[in-house]
Image (cartoon, grey):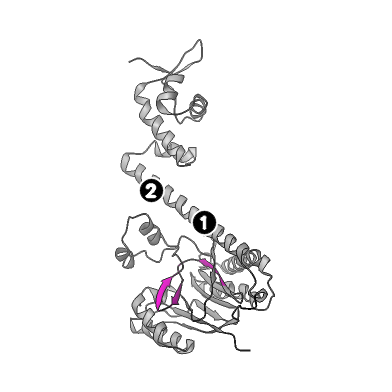
Amino acid sequence: MELLTIGTFAKASRLSPKALRLYDELGLLTPARVDPVTGYRLYAPEQLDQARLVAWLRRLGMPLARIQHICTLDAGPAAEEIRAFWAQVEADTAARRDLATFLIDHFSWKDPAMSPIAEPLGIRYAALSDTGLVRESNQDTAYAGSRLLAVADGYGSGGAPASAAAVDALKSLETDSIPASNLLSVLEDAIDQAKQAVHGISGVGPSSEAAGTTLTAMLWTGSQLALVHIGDSRVYLLRDGELFQITHDHTMVQSMVDEGRLSPEEAASHPQRSLLIRALGPGADATPDMRLHDARRGDRYLLCSDGLSTVVSTGEIRRVLSHISEPEQAVRELVALANGSGGPDNVSCVVADVMEFQQ
């Protein structure tokens, strides 16, 4: 069979001659023959399929080392590898989109104190954490203050001190005066401090290497709530009678739902539904989701660990948040619902109402 010159092969495969020479050097796409006199690379027509695959994967932005691995796989495993790669790309894109949205909102924000018609708002709040009916100890931490709301769900042998350390690292936000122009940097610094605190806990003792925690927190700025979120604790917003989940679970099962490999109904009962892909702890991806939420009078926020969300339906959560006016009573009722459903896990809730500021 007649071999193709590098120029002809490049046109047919939509790869440049320069790229083909690079892929030859890397062993990714080796010519069928190299002319011993001229040094010209010659390719067999049957190599076109692999070359086109390489071109398509490069258009996806896939690194060459990963492409080389895929080229060694059969069709099924290759498809799974491409699916996994693209899921990571979408997760990274979502994180960048959230950061872009945060920055746009941040720089578009105007201090309501500058406007004579701005409505002075404040929050009233309550927090409650409970061991549940099955676990021997409580590894959750829940906190609510005049500026900071937080829930952390620890795991591993040092889960309880890890979750406490993560929340404690954020408590300086309660008292520090944070200029609006510096909000993003302050939040990033706080997350870094929380990460270092958790790593310090994880390094104590011979059996605590796997200790870590989720961290979901909201910082009240006077007219907005700045959200930082890592893991599978959740934030819900009740607004005008409708309940919205405003966080995205950082779990393996949720990523499979995002990829279309599982339905939400299948995910709810999946045996690995609590397997985290982001957390604060050794070896974990600690990249936070960050957003700004404009507050409205009458809004109600719920921060909770998965000890609530995995056993109590969103309909029941909405019912409690809609019909129980006092935050203290609401958190008690939510914890009671979780325990009434068997209490298989620690459960933590923070409820915060946005209301007219009482001078």
Q: Nearer the viewer, residue 172 or 28?
A: 172
Task: Report x, y in % for residue 352.
Answer: 51, 81
Q: Nearer the viewer, residue 112 or 318?
A: 112
Which residue type carries mark 1?
Answer: Arg
Name the magenta segment's main secondary structure: strand
Q: Which mark is residue 97?
A: 1
**Quadrant of res 46:** top left
**Quadrant of res 306:** bottom left
Q: Residues within 10 Å of mark 2 (few under 14, many from 20)?
A: some
Q: Is residue 237 magenta?
A: yes
Task: Report x, y in % for residue 154.
Answer: 50, 72
**Quadrant of res 71:** top left
Q: Quadrant of the C terminus?
A: bottom right
* Residue 207 visible in the displayed image: no
Which residue type carries mark 2?
Answer: Arg
Q: Which mark is residue 83?
A: 2
What residue do we see at 36% from left, 59% from top? 257
Quote the CA–CA distance across marks 1 and 2: 21 Å
Q: Nearer the viewer, residue 187 or 138?
A: 187
User: Which mark is nearer the camera, 1 or 2?
Assistant: 1
Kindly state the secondary structure of the residue where label 1 is placed.
Answer: helix
Q: Is residue 148 left or right of residue 259?
A: right
What residue do we see at 32% from left, 40% from top? 75
Which range of residues does the magenta coloring cover?
A: 225-245
Kindly state the secondary structure of the residue where label 2 is placed.
Answer: helix
Task: Report x, y in % for residue 224.
Answer: 57, 73
